[in-house]
Image (cartoon, rainbow, N blue to C red):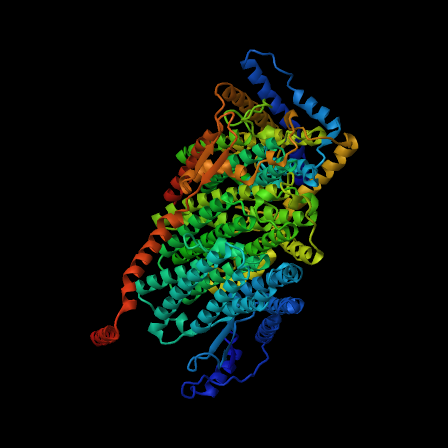
Amino acid sequence: MICRDRASAGADERDFGATSEDGPPLGFLPPLTTIRQWVPVLSLLAAGLGLYGAAAIIGLWGRRSLASVYLLSVAAGLVLAVAALRHLVEAASPVSITLPLGLPWLGAHFRIDALSAFFLLVLNGVGALIGIYALEYGRHDEEPGRVLPFYPLFLAAMNLVLAADDAFVFLASWELMSLASWLLVLSTHRQEETRPAAFLYVVMASIGTGTLLLAFGLFSGGVGSYAFEALRGAALGPGKAAVLFALALLGTGSKAGLFPLHVWLPPAHSAAPSHVSALMSGIMTKVALYGLIRIVFDLMGPQPWWWGVVVLVIGGITALMGVLYAVMQHDLKRLLAYHTVENIGIIVIGLGLALAFRANHLDALAGLALAAALLHVLNHALFKSLLFLGAGAVLVATGERDMEHLGGLIRRMPRTAFVFLIGAVAISALPPFNGFVSEWLTFQAILQGALAPQWLVKFAVPVVGAMLALSAALAAVCFVKAFGVVFLGRPRTEAAATAKEVGGLMIWPMAGLAALCTFIGIVPVVIVDLLRPAIAMLLPGSGMALAQSSLIQLVPLEAGRSSYSGIAVLLAISFLTGVLVVVIHRLAANQLRRSAAWDCGFPDPRPETQYTAGSFAQPIRRVFGASAFAARERVDMPAPGETRAATFEVTLRDPAWEFIYGPVSRVVARVADRLNVIQFLTIRRYLSLMFAALVLLLLIVAVNQ
Amino acid sequence: MREYALAGLQLLLVLALAPLLTGITRKVKARLNAKRGPSLIQPYRDLLRLLRKEAVLAPNASWLFRVSPYLIFTAVWLAAAIVPTFATDLGVSGIADLIALVALLGTARFALALAGMDVGTSFGGIGASREMMIASLAEPAMLMVTFTVALVVRSTSIASISEFLLTHDIGIRVSLFLGLVSLVMVAIAENARIPIDNPATHLELTMVHEAMILEYSGRHLALIEAAAMVKLLLYLSLISAIFAPWGMAVGTLGGGALALGLGTYALKLAGGAVLLGLFETSIAKMRVFRYGEFLGAAFLLGILAAIFLYVSQVL
């Protein structure tokens, strides 16, 4: 059965008529699928998934299939992106389909609505560009056979998560997404740090899926159905709803990288091949947030205001801690991965504000906060993928990820440097690029937080606003450091000094992402138009979000109160710069001379005299690190005449490990030790143990009835 | 048309006044040190001299090094033009609000810090690293002040902030006072003034701004110096536009109102420059690692001001 729900009245009658014609399901079998209507979105979805499937199978042939696997993935991505874009532009009503797959009495429900279409567009649009990049980058993989089959599988699984319309399909695709990405991380298993990273990842992913399983179990327990349509109207008691909310937040938060569940994310994302890192950091974390939005905003009914505060505060802490971790890193990919944690925090701040506003029936403000969050979803997908691809280009050209071994690449790799610079400026939330637009909208939503009636909200909002402001400023520190140490200055190693620019297949996708970052930065309203159907669906009372915005200006609430015009900033800066260049070169001097660096009269030719990544971060480590990471510096300076080398040592303690994972893993180890005894029992004892367990379970059942 | 003319006038005005402002500050400081000090128009002469000289580049300086001065200057110049000076509505203010202004200055700082690291000298790195550390606290402090003001007047647009404060009696607000203190501290730090940085030294390890631009010469150096002067003017205009908007021309602009606006603006700037000179002479330079405490205090004052307003706000 294919039906368009919430369509016009006439269409409704016909489609629901079709449902009743099929009659009640025969036994446990779902109704047979009869195609009555040509639904382009669903056909394109099927075609795209088919292409991914074909690519995954071809991928089994290993290295020889490289070009065909990535080309097929690009084609699939384009097909799916076009389908999603069409759905959004037409502001079409949701379409759903039930296929007789999976559990016999359930079938597999799929549905495309405005929210999933927006995420499908982000996933497949960016995914297609990453696929083009992989055509060249993939040739440098150590073992392509371990990447090729799983790469399309990973993309297909993420698509399935977004299209799922029942808990079973959702969880199965979620797990497939986790496992496929885990296998992709393991493709670099010959590197020392990959194996513990992959182990941690699979443990955290299992915990995440486990909590989601419990959440959906709790949810459907009262309804008796796993279909989202049935869950959507389910009435839950306040206690049960709160537990469900906590479980959903844990399950999706562990995948998205919310503090302190982020610990697996940086090692796993940085260990994977770079195009996979881009997918994991840029997109998979967003798919996880999609899960959160779907459950909390769409499926669950009215909610108390304090949920918003919980989400808001977690978002604030995640943003701040994420960027502080990132500033301390000297591995380029790890820095980017930690920075993902920060951006997830920013998105979650927007979601928390939307929840708090919605609970107080301030729906227009909730719409603004949600628009900010969803816009940042797209923005982060764009610039984080761009930066990871840039890091991949550096890795291909030099074989190095450690920033302390790089430097001066702007001269050897000018194109990569240029696009990486755009990504770095955009992610630091600086105008006129896209990162600024979504952070600006988040700030505008935060400013409205004073309108909430609860004291706790009034208190939490400015504090989280301060955290967001601090993390935005620290992001700039982080990317001045990343770009400055890697691309500027003098090369620190032979590898950096002899690096060669990568080929066009790698440059062009990055340039495309950089162009999108700029485009959204100057005319954000184009994307806001695509977001409106999703916001209207999740917050029916919100009216039209950012209604007074135009191509020229972005206006969050009312004109005159606040506005930002990216295009005017860009035009004004370009115009003034142009005038300035002409005036100065015509009227003043235009001679240029190359001569040795001045450096206060004592230039030292050795590249070691430059500031390193570690020394760049030292002031921040002093100011923030002492409290956040208990940072300690130890200098061992030999006395004059001694020949041993001087050493400088920094120790940082990770609070997440120190206070949460350390104690938990110690308890688990101790309990496991105790339980170890059970492994060495006689058969009699095993049998009596099973008997006791059976009696206990029967007792519980009896008492419950 | 009139709006564009006023916008153009505003752009030229901030450019023309900025070196004079620096000149006044230097003169006041010299007089307080019992020196005669250079002439008030010496900064103009310095800029012209630098503009006419050839630019010397290190052999490995990249395009970023050459482009940055222009970008830094125009970003700061545009930001300064957005702040209302002698009249509240100058046509340009719709481009960006107070938050965007902070971010625009952030773009300029980003370019400056990268330029400092381009040649790969130890001084450039030390300057960039310290500048970014200062910014990491000063920028959020300024955003918190923005929040405070925006909550009082329910707008983040700077023009409507001044207009609101001119036309409404908001009484004396504790939050605004805290915000003023915080903004002054930020202005001192952002303009590389004592006690954070010393604009007069070159060969001192505590230097921040001067270390970053050590490799610049000729027209590039002129642009960066001019940007620093415009930035000082920007902060003084901003402080007076928010906390002392008196005399600014509002609404339809008649000749008399404009003259009054220009006159009071000139007085405010001169007063600000004298106060800055007095303050700088009366205080000692701080150690680098006490910046955190100074700016942390500014940040906390800003948060406190914002929290007061959030909590006291009613629907």
Q: Is residue B155 visible?
A: no
Name which residue lies at 48% across and 25% down: B286
Name which residue lies at 60% across and 45% down: A431
Residue A699: percent from left, percent from top: 21, 75
Identify the image quadrant of residue B310. Answer: top left
**A416 or A249: nearer the viewer:** A416
- Above or below, A410 against A679 in this view is above
- Taking A643 as reference, is A244 left or right? left
Identify the image quadrant of residue B33. Answer: top right
Residue B66: percent from left, percent from top: 70, 37
Q: Is residue B280 visible?
A: yes
- Taking A525 as reference, is A263 left or right? left
Residue A173: percent from left, percent from top: 48, 70
- Taking A195 as reference, is A217 left or right? left
**B305 or A61: nearer the viewer:** A61
**A541 or B131: nearer the viewer:** B131
- Above or below, A159 against A33 in this view is above
Quadrant in which the C terminus of chain A appears: bottom left
**A592 or B36: nearer the viewer:** A592
Please state the total of marks drawn on the protein image.
Answer: 0
Residue A384: percent from left, percent from top: 57, 53
- Above or below, B122 against B22 in this view is below
